[in-house]
Image: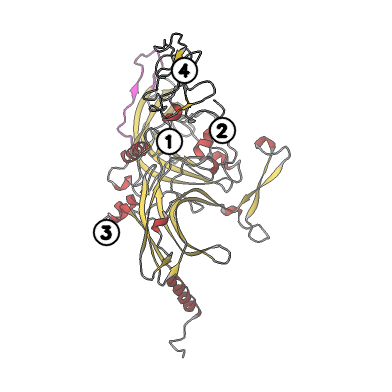
Amino acid sequence: MYSASVLSRGSMVSTMMHNVQMSRPQITISLTDEERCAYGDDVAKAKATTFTTLDKITGEVCFSAPSDTRFDEIHIMLQGQSRVWMERFGAVPGGPMSSTQTVSRQSAAQGGDESVRESRTPFLTTSQFLKLVQPIDEAAYPVPRIAEKGRKYTFPFTFVVPEQLLANNCGHRHMNDTVAAAHLSLPPSLGDGSTPTIGGCHYDDLSPDMTRIGYSINVRLLKKRESDGQSILLATETRKIRIVPVFEDLPPQIIDGKDKDLCLTKERIIRKGFLKGKMGTLTVTAQQPRPLQGGICAHANGAPPTTSLPVKVTFTPIDNSQQPPTLNSLSTKVRAHTFFSTNPIAYFPTPSAVGIDGSLGRYHESVLMGTQSLGGVKWTKSSESTSEQPTYTTDITLPIVSPKCKVLVPSFHSCLVSRTYTVEVHLDVHTPGYNMGAHPGVTLKIPLQVSRPASSDSQRSRQEIEDSELPGFGEEYFTPRRIALPESRPSSTSSSPRSSLTSPSSPASLDFMMRLPVPEQVPIVTSTRSNVQSVDVAHPPPPGYSVFNQQGTLPVRIPSPVGISPRCG
């Protein structure tokens, strides 16, 4: 019998780890809006931790030490990071795990070198595309910088979600400028499974485990080593947040007849039955729907975002005696395509590109929107004349509603991850003499854009940022100025006057198209050919004027150096 006081190896290790954690300073990160939420209100908490473009992320960081601990600085950062894992590029057959794997041979026609070369794709890629650092005033630190035992130290922070990324975040080659502009847009949070349930449903954004795009507030407490000045990490803490940037509505996508992934129009020959004669031709045409708008928590508000898909069905009979077939049902489903790669993507990926580019992965998942019965749909005959061949048409409008327990993040393209959507519409047609299994049907694939329009709060934040700029900043650099000679007038104290100096604001004979600030008052002095009168000592030159003794004592205006190049006089 073993003694109860004997601890197992696992329990000893866990106890040691617990003691190490308890001896370190404890850091907590709290958000301002989250503290105002009621207990148990998961929808309000999800909104409090979800931000969009130009939103202010405010809160405070608190830490306390179990014993007196010396520290030097604390770093508070807002970071955005993407991670992509390619599962098929893991183990090499007959060898150990490798971080890279040869996946394709690229030729010069595909953008490679003149000679055919092999490209190697990494197994895992992690990229940090956003890093904002909160400046901390020196007065906020204690003096001396020693965290006393049990005392709480608080540091507030404020971050503003940027509209786009810096240009150096995307330095790889692109197929065109449109791809480069899309890669500089802030991507939305994707694949973060740590989010609690929202509105009674578990958060699901239809993303695979191989992709992650996350944002977090990271805090690091550092101490510099006295021997070499190297920073030592005392404690760290991370708080995940969700960011869904603004994605405005884009124009409809241009689709040609050669597109293998999308189809807006399709024809099908309808027969009377198996191995029987033709009835006519059925043509189904759909228009691209308006973007599906809505926020990340829109499904929890009771009013989910919706859009409509117009579909036109036309039947052309083979002769006047044929009647149009009966339309059974029309089913609609939304398919989410997630493209990812461990190498930067230089184009807009499509499902057909997966078979060409070996380094591109694709994950797709469908959500059924519903099935609409068309038993009561009536055909409209276009021509009543018996001599002309008639056509029958009918118009159907399909509603597309954002699913309740699925989150459709906005359509986006980044360097490593992209998300697009398509709507698949299947029309089931009933023919009386067709008894061979399922009835014939027509399937269309229409592109769908999911956008995130700017809310009233975002517009208000933009206006506040514009109003907070310094008034008149930079105006002196762009204000036109003029340099002019003074106007000459007869002198009242000399019989042979030469010239007099008037206010610079009066008209002049020469104008160099530059305007100088006009002084309030310029003293008038006169001079003759024989002698030169000096300026009254009681009235010195105004600011900006100087007196030189080489050619006289006339005050000379010295232009302001602002906006004037060196050696301009």
Disc assigned to residue 176: 2
- Say whether disc 4 or disc 2 marks the residue closer to the N-terminus: 2
Would you name the residue on which mark 1 appears?
434
Q: Residue at x 43, y 48 (%)?
A: 189
Residue type for callout 2: Asn
> Disc 2 and disc 3: Cα gap in Å?
50 Å
- Say whether disc 3 or disc 1 marks the residue closer to the N-terminus: 3
Q: Which residues are magenta?
A: 372-391
Residue type for callout 3: Tyr
Circle 4 SS class = loop
- Which residue is outermost to the front? 530
Foreground disc of the pair 1, 2: 2
Circle 3 SS class = loop
Q: Residue at x 33, y 51 (%)?
A: 48
So how many labels did they put on this image? 4
> Disc 4 and disc 1: Cα gap in Å?
96 Å
Depth check: 301 or 152 in front?
A: 152
- Say whether disc 2 or disc 3 marks the residue closer to the N-terminus: 3
Disc assigned to residue 484: 4
Disc assigned to residue 39: 3
